[in-house]
């Protein structure tokens, strides 16, 4: 009987014990601190490395690395013959940094052993145009580009980026006419676990659950009636919950059918915040450690915040940026025309 009493008391204690419940925050302002300026460049690709430093690559062959503890920048210019290289896709592993140029020839560079960038992939052709890049792990990576010969251009590496192979069209869904991926913020691709999701200009999500070996194309309800409309950016908080944003950059105030959400890993997508702000945005990111509730979207028309998984949004700033990455749950780096800034949400 005595043991039974203790058992009952223990069950009562644990059943009454309160569990921590996440309460979404309600940010009302942003402190924006410029940390890099150059009026001659446009920056659409930034990446926070494992040590907390910030890397970027831009037009005019410019790329660089920021050490936040010392507040020091190291920048350089990548040259290839007489070309003016324009980088909009970058990625990293624990040991290397990668950057990929748009247009033909597509040039993919990897950190070299001698301290310079080494060319590891080159592709030429009338329709060559690469848009974004990511790594599943230190060994396997992927880069995506516009459709060519009937399918999206997708290249993969399985040897830590030393060599890259282009996937054949017979392992990819047939592309819609003119289907592409917008090179707006290096965020129309997301990888998690063994999975990958790609958002396209045709409003499709390309989905792979085996690191790019097989694919399916999923039509979403995002607006796609003009060539300038479609999915510009996607992000996933986990392997089930994801968000996409886009619209039309030529009509940036349009806010109908430009925001979509999935709760089943990208198999189905629903429109949210219909006819509500924000309009066109080029980048959307989940805030870390927010249980998939808090999102930030940015574009050249400003910065917006949601604390209910994208159902409603609050406009926080008119400051325009093309892309954003979070360092922690209240600090981010954002880049745009001629600048990179540190953002503090409060």
Image (tube, rainbow, N blue to C red):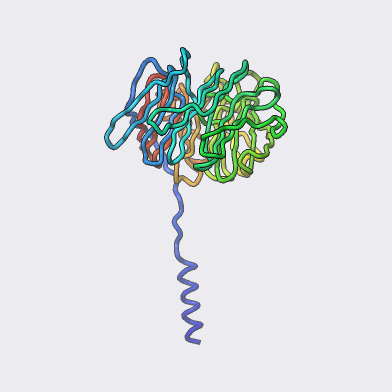
Q: Is residue 76 above or below residue 209?
A: above
Q: Quadrant of residue 332?
A: top left
- Of 189 and 258, which appears nearest the observer? 189
x, y (%) of residue 302?
A: 44, 25
- Outermost residue on the left side: it is 70
Which residue appears farthest toward the top when viewing the image? 82
Q: Is residue 106 visible?
A: yes
- Number of callouts: 0
Residue 311 in sight: no
Q: Quadrant of the C terminus?
A: top left
Q: Where is residue 50, by image quadrant?
A: top left
Q: Can you give x and y, in whole percent of width and height, for residue 300 in the image? A: 46, 21
- Which of 33/197 is in front? 197
Residue 47 at x, y percent in the picture: 43, 33
Q: Which percent across, then down, holds residue 253?
A: 52, 21
Q: Residue at x 48, y 82 (%)?
A: 5
Left or right placement of residue 20 versus residue 192 in this view: left
298, above or below 9, in the image = above
Residue 239 located left or right of residue 221: left
Between residue 113 and residue 131, name the one nearer to us: 113
User: Which residue is located at x 50 percent, y 73 percent?
Assistant: 11
Q: Residue at x 31, y 35 (%)?
A: 68
Q: Can you tell which quarter of the image residue 227 is in?
A: top right
Considering every residue shown, the one lying at the far front of the view is: 114
């Amino acid at each position: 009987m005595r043991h039974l009493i203790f058992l009952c008391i223990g069950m009562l204690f644990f059943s009454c014990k309160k569990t921590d419940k996440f309460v979404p925050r309600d940010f009302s302002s942003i402190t924006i601190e410029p940390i890099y300026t150059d009026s001659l460049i446009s920056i659409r690709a930034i990446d926070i490395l494992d040590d907390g430093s910030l890397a970027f690559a831009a037009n005019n062959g410019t790329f660089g690395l920021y050490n936040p503890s010392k507040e020091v920048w190291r920048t350089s210019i990548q040259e290839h013959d007489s070309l003016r290289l324009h980088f909009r896709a970058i990625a990293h592993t624990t040991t290397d940094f990668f950057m990929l140029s748009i247009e033909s020839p597509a040039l993919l560079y990897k950190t070299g052993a001698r301290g310079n960038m080494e060319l590891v992939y080159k592709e030429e052709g009338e329709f060559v145009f690469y848009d974004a890049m990511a790594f599943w792990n230190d060994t396997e990576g992927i880069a995506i580009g516009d459709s060519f010969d009937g399918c999206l251009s997708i290249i993969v590496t399985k040897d830590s980026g030393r060599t890259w192979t282009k996937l054949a069209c017979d392992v990819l869904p047939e592309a819609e006419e003119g289907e592409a991926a917008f090179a707006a913020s290096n965020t129309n691709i997301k990888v998690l676990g063994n999975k990958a999701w790609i958002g396209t200009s045709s409003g499709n999500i390309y989905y792979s659950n085996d690191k790019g070996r097989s694919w399916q194309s999923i039509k979403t309800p995002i607006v796609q009636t003009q060539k300038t409309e479609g999915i510009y950016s996607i992000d996933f908080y986990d392997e089930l919950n994801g968000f996409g944003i886009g619209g039309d950059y030529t009509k940036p105030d349009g806010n109908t059918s430009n925001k979509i959400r999935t709760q089943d890993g990208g198999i189905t997508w629903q429109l949210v915040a219909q006819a509500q702000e924000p309009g066109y945005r080029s980048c959307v990111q989940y805030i870390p450690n927010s249980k998939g509730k808090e999102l930030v979207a940015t574009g050249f028309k400003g910065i917006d915040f949601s604390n209910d998984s994208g159902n409603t949004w609050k406009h926080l700033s008119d400051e325009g940026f093309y892309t954003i990455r979070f360092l922690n749950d209240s600090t981010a780096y954002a880049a745009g025309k001629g600048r990179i800034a540190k953002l503090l949400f409060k």
